[in-house]
Image: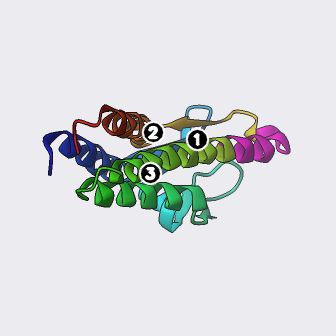
Amino acid sequence: MPKLKRISASMFVIILLCFFFPFVTVSCGNTQVAELSGIQLVTGSKVETPEFAGGEEIETVRPNTQALVALAAAGVGLGTSFLKFHRSVLVTAGSGALGTIMLLSLKSGIDKSLLERGAGFAGLAGLRVTYGLGFWGSLLLFIAAAAFNIWLFLDKKDQ
């Protein structure tokens, strides 16, 4: 494998690792309500919400399609990083671009859902979502991987 393509493979490995770190933290005021990793967003999860008005409640988080497609894009990007033909970098760049789009779509969907959910309840007015290291790390690396692989294709020295 040419040396420069190893950089691309390394980016996708780190992206896959980022999915194990916290992606999303939901809090109300100063109380953390839920924290989900990228893997939990992909597979779905059950989250215990703290007592606000009467008792703990278990909330089910359904698997998220955008998170699943982003994870698959990272896997495809990693796999195509090992292919030897020159045009494979276009597939790898496409994987980076698709992962970027899916993560931005995921963020938009979570923000919209939280806004709609909090709007109907006076007690949820302070509901806030923050995005963690896993989310931002994978987003930045998807962007970097797409740009890097486009550069590799245009450079034509890595044939």
Side of 87 where 13 appears, left or right? left
**Helix, strand or loop status at disc 3:** helix
Q: Compared with residue 76, is residue 134 higher up or lower down, i.e. above or below? A: above
Foreground pick, 47 / 16: 16
Circles 3 and 1: CB atoms closer than 8 Å: no
Q: Mark 3 points at which residue?
A: 95
Mark nearest the camera among 2 and 3 is: 3
Q: Mark 1 points at which residue?
A: 104
Q: Residue at 38%, 60% (x, y): give it.
A: 76
The C terminus lies in which quarter of the figure?
top left
Q: Give the magenta range.
A: 111-123
**Helix, strand or loop status at disc 2:** helix
Tell which circle, 3 or 1, labels the residue nearer the N-terminal end.
3
7 part of magenta stretch: no
Circles 1 and 2: CB atoms closer than 8 Å: yes
Q: What residue type is labelled 3?
A: Ser
Using the rendered image of the protein, determine whether residue 126 is visible from the camera's viewpoint.
yes
Q: Name the residue under label 2.
A: 139
Q: How far apart are marks 1 and 2 (CA)?
A: 8 Å
- On the image, the x and y values in percent for residue 114 come to 71, 44
Q: Residues within 10 Å of mark 3 (few under 14, many from 20)?
A: many
Foreground pick, 124 / 86: 86
Q: Residues within 10 Å of mark 2 (few under 14, many from 20)?
A: many
